[in-house]
Image: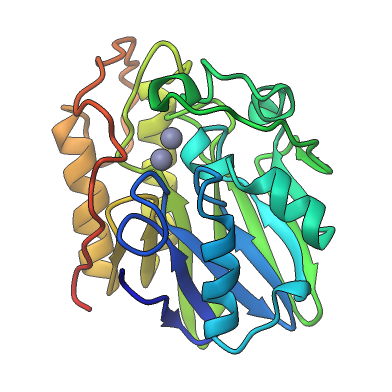
């Protein structure tokens, strides 16, 4: 098992395939005096996540907030437990909240994994394109980046002079079951590019930095879908099929680290 590690000052990768559970998305932790978790893995690894937080000499009791970037089991499965145990607030976009609150096995992808999904109530539902959340002196910005799912969000943080984006499932996949929309996704990706992130934290493939590497990664995803990397008025109606089988069977690897 890989160890958790620091991505930027007070920003940690605490879970994912090879770190906590092969089915987990990459799980990030931000120390803002209180602890913020971005995504929670599939639910089988919650104790390991807690163990990893302690290994960083941080106290999991300080977990105040859980952002769920979208409604798939590999991202939301641990939320119910972590909320219950630490009293953390769950934040997600309103468009994906139904699936999370119902524990929808099909739409969440739990069915593919042969897993159950414990429903969890979403304390703060995001309705706007951008919403700011204050934590002491610092802020996190949620940016609505639909495409993979209608309620996908990316989280933006400025830390130590660096622009960090937790964009999670940038790579898709795009499926009718998920109500994916390639046209929306392309706009979302261009939006992320316009921010010029120094560090891009992705949901399964790892961490891309500096900006040129992050840019190349996002552009390569657009190109792979046959989409322009610069703004275009062209409407896209195609939804590609499930490209890579079970997308979580991917070991994370890290660029330039
Ligand atoms: Zn995922
Ligand atoms: Zn997903």
- Percent coordinates x, y for residue 195 in the rendering: 44, 60
Count of numbered marks:
0
Quadrant of the rendered image holding ligand 2: top left
How is this picture coloured? rainbow
Residue 68 placement (x, y as % from top left): 61, 46
Which residue is found at the position 27% from the left and 30% from the top?
246
Q: Please state the horizontal and vertical placement of residue 32, each as a whole percent of the image.
A: 69, 79
If the image is split into quadrants, where does the N terminus sit?
bottom left
Depth check: 228 or 70 in front? 70
> Which residue: 56% across, 19% down?
105
Left or right for 100, reference 172: right
Q: Residue at x 75, y 48 (%)?
A: 90
Residue 218 against residue 88 in the figure, above or below:
above
**Residue 143 in the figure: left or right of residue 189:** right
Q: Quadrant of residue 104?
A: top right
Up-down relation of residue 161 to residue 72 (above or below): below
117 vs 216, left or right, is: right
Of residue 144 and residue 251, the one placed in the foreground of this image is: 251
Q: Nearer the viewer, residue 119 or 147?
A: 119
State left or right for residue 166 relative to residue 22: right
Residue 78 % position (x, y): 61, 47
Quadrant of the image containing the C terminus: bottom left
Residue placed at 81% from the left, 79% from the top? 136
């Amino acid at each position: 098992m890989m160890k958790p590690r620091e991505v930027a000052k007070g920003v940690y990768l605490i879970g994912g395939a090879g770190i906590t559970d092969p089915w987990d998305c990459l799980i990030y932790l931000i120390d803002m005096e209180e602890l913020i978790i971005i995504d929670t893995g599939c639910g089988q690894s919650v104790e390991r996540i807690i163990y990893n937080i302690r290994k960083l000499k941080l106290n999991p009791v300080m977990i105040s907030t859980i952002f769920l970037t979208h409604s798939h089991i590999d991202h939301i499965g641990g939320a119910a437990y972590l909320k219950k145990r630490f009293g953390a607030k769950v934040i997600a976009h309103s468009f994906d909240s139904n699936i999370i609150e119902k524990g929808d096995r099909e739409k969440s992808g739990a069915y593919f994994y042969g897993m159950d999904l414990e429903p969890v109530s979403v304390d703060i539902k995001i309705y706007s394109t951008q919403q700011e959340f204050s934590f002491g002196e610092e802020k996190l910005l949620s940016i609505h980046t639909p495409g993979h799912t209608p309620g996908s969000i990316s989280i933006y943080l400025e830390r130590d002079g660096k622009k960090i984006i937790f964009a999670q499932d940038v790579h898709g996949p795009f499926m009718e079951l998920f109500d994916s929309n390639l046209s929306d996704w392309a706009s979302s990706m261009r939006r992320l590019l316009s921010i010029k992130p120094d560090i891009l934290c992705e949901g399964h493939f790892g961490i891309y930095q500096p900006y040129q590497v992050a840019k190349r990664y996002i552009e390569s995803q657009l190109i792979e879908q046959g989409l322009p990397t610069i703004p275009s008025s062209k409407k896209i109606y195609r939804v590609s099929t499930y490209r890579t089988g079970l997308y979580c069977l991917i070991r994370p690897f890290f660029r330039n680290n």
